[in-house]
Amino acid sequence: MRNPSMLTPIVSIFCLFFLLYQITLVASSTPPLYVPIDDITLDCGSATSGKSMDLNGRDWTGDFQSKYFPKELDNLKSKISNATGERIITKAPYSTARISYSQFTYVFPVTVGPKFVRLHFNSVIYPGFEGSKALFTVIAGSFTLLRNFTLVPDDSLQEKPFFKEFCINVGKDKKLNLTFIPFSTTFHAFINGIEIVSMPDDLYYRGKSEEGIPNLSGSPFYINDDMALEMVYRLNVGGILIRQTDDTGLFREWSTDDSYFMGGSQMTNDQSMVLHYTKVPNYTAPDDVYRYARTMGFNRNKNRLSNLTWELPVDMGFYYLVRLHFCEIDPNMNLVGQRRFIIYIDYLFAEMDADVILWTDEIGTPIYRDYLAMIEKKGVEDNSHILSIDLHPVTSVSHDDAILNGLEVFKLSNTDGNLAKHGAEIIDLHQPTTMMSKTKKFIAIGIGTGFLVLLFLMGCMVFWKVKKSKRYVSYYPPSRCWCLCWLRLNPYKGKQTGKKTSSLRKEQCHHFSLADIKIATNNFHEDLIIGKGGFGNVYKGQIDDEETMTVAIKRLNPGSRQGAHEFQTEIEMLSQLRYVHLVSLIGYCNEKGEMILVYDYMANGTLREHLYDTNNDALPWKKRLDICIGAARGLDYLHRGVKHTIIHRDVKTTNILLDDRWVAKVSDFGLSKMDQNNTAVSTMVKGTWGYLDPEYARCQKLSDKSDVYSFGVVLLEVLCARKALNQKLEEEEWNLAHWARKCIERGTINEIIDPYLKGKIAPVCFKVFMQIAESCTRDQGIQRPKMGDVVEKLKLALELQENADAEKESINPSGEHIYLDTLSFCIDVTNDGLWATNAHKEHGMTSDSTGIGTGLTCSSFEMDSITSHKTFS
Ligand SMILES: *[C@@H]1O[C@H](CO)[C@@H](O)[C@H](O)[C@H]1NC(C)=O
Ligand SMILES: *[C@@H]1O[C@H](CO)[C@@H](O)[C@H](O)[C@H]1NC(C)=O
Ligand SMILES: *[C@@H]1O[C@H](CO)[C@@H](O)[C@H](O)[C@H]1NC(C)=O
Ligand SMILES: *[C@@H]1O[C@H](CO)[C@@H](O)[C@H](O)[C@H]1NC(C)=O
Ligand SMILES: *[C@@H]1O[C@H](CO)[C@@H](O)[C@H](O)[C@H]1NC(C)=O
Ligand SMILES: *[C@@H]1O[C@H](CO)[C@@H](O)[C@H](O)[C@H]1NC(C)=O
């Protein structure tokens, strides 16, 4: 029932990884391909004359002293205000607004040519305007950009900043004026930030001198200078979010297409592909737009019967420019005629026989195609329409497939210069589609690289400080790695969901939407994989709660689990288990066949990573003891702390994780067996070789003592810094537990301990530690201690070590404490009986009923028959 390979731990990584990540970031930050002449970022309502940085590391200048905000007439009636609300955004341009009951105007004396105009809004409550509503029109020269635009501040939804992007051509001797007009004196207009960025003349505009855009139902069409455009969609199809600062210099943001894609595709990418910009200018779109794509996959029969489909809600009564970006990235598709497809836009033929190689001659060559779609208004009531883009394969010799890499959709101003739809234009923050499209723009991550390095150093300093000064206190510690926090400083990100108002940590178990998970993992981006196993991948992700939280996201392979119902039951059980020494399940996602678990992120990875086969520093002895005590407590909690005993079944050093403060946490107990009747459970033998309770293997009788055995092996592993099972060694040394027992018998146990620990363990401590390890790894469960006893004994061992160290210290305060006595240990027979009596008392059972007798009778069990269920670690 349980797939053992699922037990592969949430492997985590270290600051080094992030250094490397940073290095790649630095390496990839090349100078922009286009440098705009006009590049204005105006932080409206900000009195600061200096610059303030936004989330992407761009500088914004306050409008108060600005030449773009003339101090005349109506303008002086407008006020500046700070955003308020549950989450105050401290980053430009969203923390302040210019807000007014009367109209106000910005004047931008810019160069001739087309410009991007981006209007940034943060719809929250502004002091002094609480009671009134925002309802206003925005005019740019002769264009109406927004009409009866309304944003209802709703605190329960939290702030969702977004921007609207327009393209406006500025003529000779003209200024770009932006006027904000409230509907009446009881309504207000406001704006948080304005961006004006020049664009290349030929980027979206197309004069008569150029090739027209095919009118899907007639003659070619030109986008003249006297038109304004509103960007409605800009998607990196099959790809990742590309933030404004990662564009080609034009500060466009490219969202993922997940919310609009109708399923059934294969996402492909070639992140290292070198692109040849021979067909289109190299500023057309960032490389990552062309390096990622969606295709249909290999099933020709299925492909023939389906389309790659995107559905985009649009306003009716406008023309739309639809730009499709293509680039063949599959090296096997380098011939004309291999991948041919029909393009339908709004159910009309846009292209009868699209063939990217035919257009571009070779792979890795970006190209785009523009189409015009007329979305006519049919009735007075009709306002919204779904613009559908369908790609359907044309049967060819070798493949039936289609491809799309990027998609942009612009609304074109109509003849009266209007871009706004009729009637009130309400941004409904509740509506999922608009919500996605608006908020996705704010998943912007990271900051300028120089700043990153600085933050990295600062983060590490904080990290070390915290590590040094604080011991672990609360039950639900923020187990983020401090070093990571800055990586995605992003107060907006969590708002995608719009419903996560309460703290995730206070919640029992949060249900995440798949969209949340995709955002958190950058659409399951490979770079974020921190662990792989037969069960699927583990990703590091960022979830926004009250603050950004780093989490480990385990995505189960569809085949690896039984089904949604069992998944759900398990989550219910897991979410009840909250203990400092257990890795907490924060939430889960169960959507579209995906089964995903979200856990606390463990910054210091697994215990094994700090013992052997590693570049990490060796752990000091006392720290090892501390970790063992923590893990033992976690297991004790599983055994006794909950209503029914929970048997972990796979205790091993890779399932003991360490958080940023080195607190040990047992993981992967999720798939453990609940022992309903407190008796030995008969079940198929599962576990990991080397840790497997021999009695359980023989008799298939599972009890909490099976965990004790495995934990004993962990103790030996911690002491000897070697694998539980190492077949590279002499045969008699393969199994650590068996080998240690032999060494104890021979009196050579001191020879197999971790060389690093030589001279560092106080002999009194060693004796107690070995007592525990030896008793835990006894053949018969009844002879092993209970986890609670183990905890107590380990605490004693630590205390003895501390006392011995203190004594050494008092004799020689400055020197290293070296224990020269040879460590020795022999089996203490009297103690033997003690464990056994304890076990008897607690269970009130006789030895026969707890397995001594059966242990002997079934010792002839054939090992072969059970090997198939076990994993080798
Ligand atoms: C806005 O916040 C800034 C900084 O906290 C403060 O100096 C300023 O007075 C505030 N402005 C208003 C209008 O409250
Ligand atoms: C823009 O505003 C300035 C100052 O108010 C005015 O002189 C100019 O005529 C306006 N230009 C346009 C195109 O509206
Ligand atoms: C596109 O063609 C149709 C049909 O010929 C025509 O009615 C329409 O005006 C054309 N649109 C444009 C923008 O040229
Ligand atoms: C981008 O294209 C321009 C014009 O063709 C060229 O001068 C420039 O070197 C290109 N930049 C890169 C990085 O390829
Ligand atoms: C593909 O989409 C087009 C346009 O929407 C539609 O006419 C066609 O029936 C679709 N084909 C399939 C196989 O779904
Ligand atoms: C703007 O909204 C008001 C109030 O809802 C309405 O009376 C008016 O007709 C609207 N104007 C336009 C042009 O849609």
Image: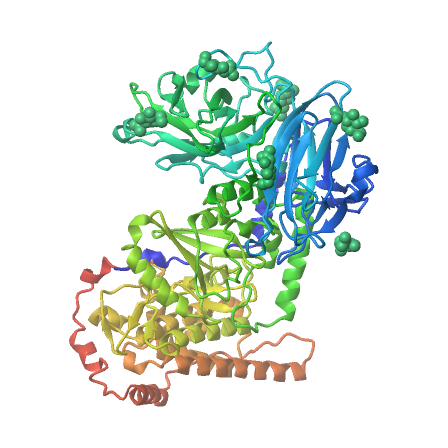
Q: Is residue 841 visible?
A: yes
- For this view, does 233 lie left or right of residue 788? right
- For this view, does 690 lie left or right of residue 9? left
Q: Residue at x 25, y 29 (%)?
A: 301
- For this view, does 409 lie left or right of residue 640? right
Residue 281: quadrant of the picture: top right
Q: Nearer the viewer, residue 600 or 11?
A: 600
Count of numbered badges drawn on the protein = 0
- For this view, does 170 lie left or right of residue 771? right
Residue 667: quadrant of the picture: bottom left
Where residue 371 appears, as percent x and y from the top left, is 48, 20
Q: Residue at x 31, y 24 (%)?
A: 400
Q: Give the colour scheme of this rendering.
A: rainbow
Where residue 796 appears, as percent x and y from the top left, is 49, 84
Please tell me whether residue 852 is drawn above or below residue 357 in the rendered image: below
Where residue 397 appears, as percent x and y from the top left, is 29, 18
Q: Residue at x 66, y 61 (%)?
A: 462
Q: Nearer the viewer, residue 531 or 301?
A: 301
Please tell me whether residue 638 is drawn above or below residue 86 in the rendered image: below
